[in-house]
Amino acid sequence: MLDKSTPTLTQLYDSVLKRYETAPAISFGGETLTYGALDDRSARLANALVDLGLEPEDRVGLLLSNRLEYPIADIALARAGLAKVPLNDMLSADDIEYMLDNSDASAVIVGPAFSETIQTVAPNVPSLDLIVTIDTAALPAIGDDHHVAQLEDLLETAAPEPPDVDVSTDTLAGVFHTGGTTGDPKGVKHTQENLALNALAHAIELDIQPRDDLLLMTPLPHSAGLIMAGGLTQGSSHVITQGFDAEQALDTIEREAISWTFMVPTMIYRVLDVLVDREYDTASLETLVYGAAPMKPARLREGLDELGDVFVQLYGQYETPDLITVLPKAAHDPDDERRLSSCGLPTAMCEVKIVDEDGEEVPPGQPGEILARGAYSMEGYYELPEKTAETIEDGWIHTGDIGKRDEEGYVYIVDRDSDVIISGGMNVYSVTVEDVIQQHKDVANVAVIGVPDDEWGEAVKAVIVPADTTIDRADLESFCADRLADYERPKSFDVVDELPTTPYGKLDKKRLREPYWDDQSREIS
């Protein structure tokens, strides 16, 4: 009888790596891996990890910046039935330690840029036993309390065929950490089935075509990794870079005849600014996906005029990995500013409804909380059953975002219920920043908000009530730099006598934001 079950992520990778064996898969720094080479190396690493005692569903941190080893490790974990814990390279050491500890990670694969970080973090993560490093110089310094292996040694000695492990659609395949404004980041659990379907959905919804040439410049532990999985299902080639430079991006598009790329709005703005003064051949570019932050309709129209009908917008979150709605190319009408501010229609594998405080659906045009239910929705939060029960109701995920729909079903986000600031495509959680600033000796009280910024979409602003009459700004900036990731640090500080509160005595951030957002829409696309 025909098996109609969904393929596992392991089965999906096993299939595509063989099917496109001779095609280029990943390029970085002048070196290219074919699908066959990616097959061989990921299978060897998967075998090595199993031989070292890791078992299905064990959590493994991926502490790697964009480089060839990332897709090798990512795919190896899936083929070994292990659960990846992606660690964004912009995280602080405290964040990395928390996420490894919170997920009970048994192992971590570490890139050269994080050799010192892992030496500091590892002793504070009781579950951590195995450290796989790319930097041989770091081996002696990590200590004797952990089993330390060098990646290249494992690849040289392990068997080249994928390991025979017991993996099903329900096998835990990933724990993705997201943040909240009222506590520590939560580990979002996804199964092999979730991530397999999500990879296919990325290919379908984001118009990734077979043999497309993709340019991925944002961190692979973030959205780019999910996109890469979608591209691999199609036999696409991927050029990955570390960091972003607008001129280098345009050079790469021209030189490599890139047909598909992903950028956050800040990146697009910088590209458009470069194109004002210098011409590049971007004729090969057929699809430019954007998301993760608000984009000004005026600049989107500028992009349509300069680059053509290439834009696709996505909206999502880790609970439904990056795909709740999509605004396709056909909906990017430069003459329809209202539609340009929409985040699109629900994807084929995701339903959306907007409800009031009582859980009742609201009519078109009325704001309410966005709820999503999809084939690739999370299984829950790692070791947080109560929070899972609060977030998932009859299969519907409470996104925490406030939005509305028009008569045609297009979704518009009008605010972030959790006061998340989206700056340059990165989520900044205001309470995290407030907790740090509040510790400074000169600060009596603080509120952190997002304010309009032409480059970043929203910029982080700290509004401070001083403990005394003055605040040493330079000292405060240094204090934040030591404790916060780059994208979390306030770009400006205001000093006030008191912070506004609601009639119930709670901090009123809506009133605090109003002067900065006068005459501007805070709809988030």
Image: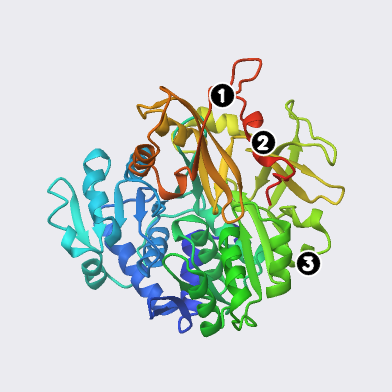
Instruction: Determine whether the residue tagged by mark 3 lies in a helix, strand or loop.
Output: helix
Q: Which residue is mark 1?
A: 499
Residue 449, by quadrant, is top right
| Mark sitting earlier along the chain (2/1) | 1
Task: Give percent across and percent down for residue 280.
Answer: 59, 82
Q: Which residue is mark 3?
A: 330
| Residue at 70 percent of width and 57 percent of height | 326
Quote the CA–CA distance across marks 2 and 3: 36 Å
Q: Amino acid at mark 1?
A: Leu
Quote the CA–CA distance across marks 2 and 1: 14 Å
Report whether residue 412 is seen.
yes
Instruction: Determine whether the residue tagged by mark 1 lies in a helix, strand or loop.
Output: loop
Report whether residue 1 is seen.
no
Q: Which image quarter holds the N terminus? A: bottom right
Closer to the observer: label 3 or label 1? 1
Labelled disc at residue 515: 2
Q: Neighbour class for label 3 at 10 Å: few (<14), some, many (≥20)? A: few
Q: Of residues 210 and 445, which is closer to you in this image?
A: 445
Horizontal side of 239 relative to 519 (left or right) equals: left
Name of the residue lying farthest toward the front: 469
Quote the CA–CA distance across marks 3 and 1: 45 Å
Q: Of residues 42 and 140, which is closer to you in this image?
A: 140
Task: Give percent across and percent down for residue 282.
Answer: 62, 80
